[in-house]
Image (tube, rainbow, N blue to C red):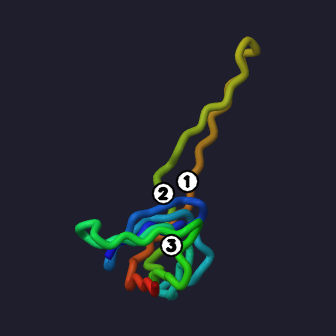
Amino acid sequence: MYAVIEVKWHQYIVKKWDTIVVDKIEWNKWDKINIKEVLLAFDDKWEKVIVWSPYIQKAKVSAELLETKKWKKIGVLKFKRKNRYQRRIWFRPCETVLEIKKIEIDG
């Protein structure tokens, strides 16, 4: 069983025991998270497909928070043309690693 979930305004296709990397979530390590924003659910051969608008009712995906870490450094260049103004900003965004434990679809 596969599911398309929405976490922090991003969509991910997941199945059981998948590991996904999302934007930072303010939870403690090894906490259980229930994601109720399930957009689509389908099986391996696309024989059973469940779609609802916008989310499937009574559906949830259980996940476990593995770790929160920083990603690699990203450089952003901002400039104004004709003024000879340039500024480079470096930052490291935080990310959270989730492991999908269970996909429950009622309906």
Tell me the kind of residue under disc 1. Answer: Arg
Q: Nearer the viewer, mark 1 or mark 3?
A: 3
What is the spatial separation of the Cα atoms under label 1 and label 2, in whole angstroms? 6 Å
Q: Nearer the viewer, mark 3 or mark 2?
A: 3
Tell me which numbered mark, 3 or 2, is placed earlier along the sequence. Answer: 3
Tell me which numbered mark, 1 or 3, is placed earlier along the sequence. Answer: 3
Q: Nearer the viewer, residue 31 or 61?
A: 61
Image x and y of residue 81, in percent: 71, 16
Tell me the kind of residue under disc 3. Answer: Val
The residue where tag 1 is placed is 92
Image x and y of residue 82, in percent: 73, 12
What is the spatial separation of the Cα atoms under label 3 and label 2, in whole angstroms? 26 Å
Can residue 51 be seen from the camera position used here? Answer: yes
Q: Do labels 1 and 2 touch, CB within 8 Å?
A: yes
Q: Residue furthest top?
A: 82
Tell me the SS state at disc 1: loop
Tell me the kind of residue under disc 2. Answer: Trp
Q: Is residue 76 above or below residue 64?
A: above
Q: Is residue 29 above or below residue 74?
A: below
Residue drawn at x 59%, y 72% is: 25
The residue where tag 2 is placed is 71
The N terminus lies in quadrant: bottom left
The residue where tag 3 is placed is 38
Would residue 60 be found to the left or right of residue 86 on screen?
left
Residue drawn at x 53%, y 85% is: 58
Tell me the SS state at disc 3: strand
Residue drawn at x 39%, y 85% is: 102
